[in-house]
Image (cartoon, rainbow, N blue to C red):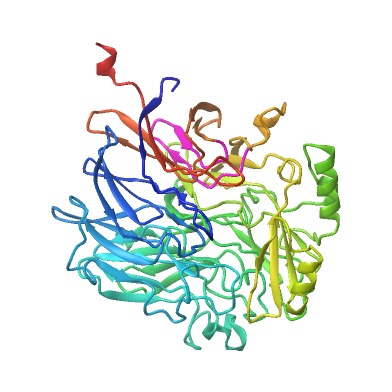
Amino acid sequence: MASLQVAWTFRTGDAYQPPRGRPTAFEATPLYVDGTLYLSTPLGRVIALDPVSGRQRWVFDAKVNRDAGYGDFASRGVSMWQRGRERRIFVATIDARLIALDANTGRPIQGFGDMGIVDLRQGLRIAPTGFADYQVTSPPAVIGNTIVVGSAIQDGARTTEPSGEIRAFDAVTGALKWRWDPIPQDPKAVGADTWRSASATRTGAANVWSVIVADPGRNLVFVPTSSPSPDYYGGERLGDNLFSDSVVALRADTGARVWHFQTVHHDLWDYDVASPPILFNWRRDGRTVAAIGVASKTGHLFVLDRQTGKPLIPVDERQVPKSDVPGEEASPTQPFPTAPRSLARTTLTAEEAWGLTDEDRAWCRQTLSTLRADGFFTPPSLRGTIVVPGNVGGMAWGGMAHDRVNNLLVTSVNNIAAEIRLIPRDAIEEQRSAGRLSGDFELAQQRNTPYALVRRLLLGPKTLLPCTPPPWGTLTAVRAATGEIAWQVPLGRFPGTESARDGAQWGSIALGGPIVTAGGLVFTAGTLEAAIYAFDVQTGRQLWTGTLPTSARATPMTYRGPDGRQYVVISAGGHGPIGPPLGDYLVAFALPDARSDRK
């Protein structure tokens, strides 16, 4: 491990800060097929690389309008379809175009859609009005001759955000094969009664912005859905709101729903199922079951039967706090797995406030003391509410890895609190004038409701370190059979803690996931530190750290190259204001070439 070193670095040239809106986020996990690496960039370029040298073989430019004002300005990778010797690369761009390319040349497939392109902004139940409100950030799922795509929809703008239909297209022609709306439109359909007062017809989102997972052997795709619109006030969509915040199994050839499991009822906290589900064989007491693991921003990890959606580790419905906001009715209960307990911190009080300096600690304590904090799932309020985990999540989009040898599920976990506050619409200007909307608050208008929303991560003003006691980020291994935590160790380092005596034990939030190798190594990055790490999968002991040009917000991948060496590759794109600066680096690590050692 100590001799693992940089083999090559490739720069995409696509790091960009628009005049307005968020900067690009280079989060792609490359795809390795037939001796070529394929990746995508936020600006809509698809690049094919030599896996040994990192040299560019071809590039396709979708010519994305870089100044359209996107929300999440990211592209997390491409997909491959193959039939005989034919290979097609599929990419879904930030401006919502599904594009088919010849894998050998990078040229668009003329017979697919309109000269190689399908416009995903067309044909929705609720149409988009701008580029920021309807995007695609994750790669399409490929299953047989079907391409399945979701969408990324702007949070908090209005009740009638674009609809979040999942759609499937013919891989050869681009023709639409089926669509499935996570918000039931037939009043007689299963789940329709969970949308009171006909709210299903006017509510948007509940979309799938994370990675869709395919099980070809069972003709299933598993879609992880998000919160309905808007995120933090549900008075216009009362009820449990099926099939939002769920993992749903759909028939890949028809789009028919097979089963569902809802992780959060009537979401008021932006608790999407952001982490891609993971497929694995669950083994216990001599019994083996095809299973699916579902991780949520709540920090909950659910283990379900892949055929039926029934929990393999029991789940309880527990009472949670009520809403005190006029017009709102929070769900009286929420699902809790009996094991593991939430992998993330779920409560925070003023007495527990943390700060590196006396000034920060006092600010955190004072701020927390003014906010509602009645335990996990405390609803948004007019005075302000502490939300733990915050909107970054418990578990974010990086996903999990499964170690088959030791039957462990491994994931990165965040521990950072947020403040959310509802504002009566007629009081917005008054609060703005009083300075209550200034500084680090994000304002969401939540139009067509009585309340706008402000939120912020709770960070001490002097050091910008969390008010939550550390560790702020961990790498966690769970015994898949029982849900017990096998080990949990700090992951990465938060900027500003370099001189602190215990800073290395405090961890960092992480927006990328791990992989596990056959040799028992866990590789992961995603932290605010410009680094990639290797851990022992059995013990959690950190074995190696590799330095990156900037921090990563992606999940690594590994492959054996044509030269016989094993490579580990990670996209380093930076974290912007909180962490290291933006970047456009794809970095490959490998052991030294044994042939060169003999020279």
Judged by its main secondary structure, the magenta piece is loop
Q: Residue 217's spot in the image, x, y percent? A: 30, 59
Q: Which residues are magenta?
A: 507-529
Q: Tell me the residue at 37%/57% (across/down).
A: 139
Quadrant for the N terminus in the image: top left
Q: Tell me the residue at 73%/51% (across/down).
A: 458
Q: In this orientation, which residue lies closer to the viewer: 588 or 394? A: 588
Residue 460 in the magenta stretch? The answer is: no
Q: In this orientation, which residue lies closer to the viewer: 220 or 441? A: 441
Q: Tell me the residue at 49%/56% (across/down).
A: 18
Figure quadrant of residue 258:
bottom left
Q: Residue 323's spot in the image, x, y percent? A: 76, 72
Q: Is residue 169 above or below residue 276?
A: below
In the displayed orientation, state which residue is furthest to the front. Answer: 19
Q: Residue 301's spot in the image, x, y percent? A: 57, 53
In the displayed orientation, state which residue is furthest to the left. Answer: 85
Quadrant for the C terminus in the image: top left
Tell whether 92 sits left or right of 294. Answer: left
Tell whether 234 sits left or right of 534. Answer: right
Q: Residue 61's spot in the image, x, y percent? A: 29, 56
Q: How many marks?
A: 0
Figure quadrant of residue 362:
top right
Residue 528 in the magenta stretch? The answer is: yes
In the displayed orientation, state which residue is furthest to the top. Answer: 599
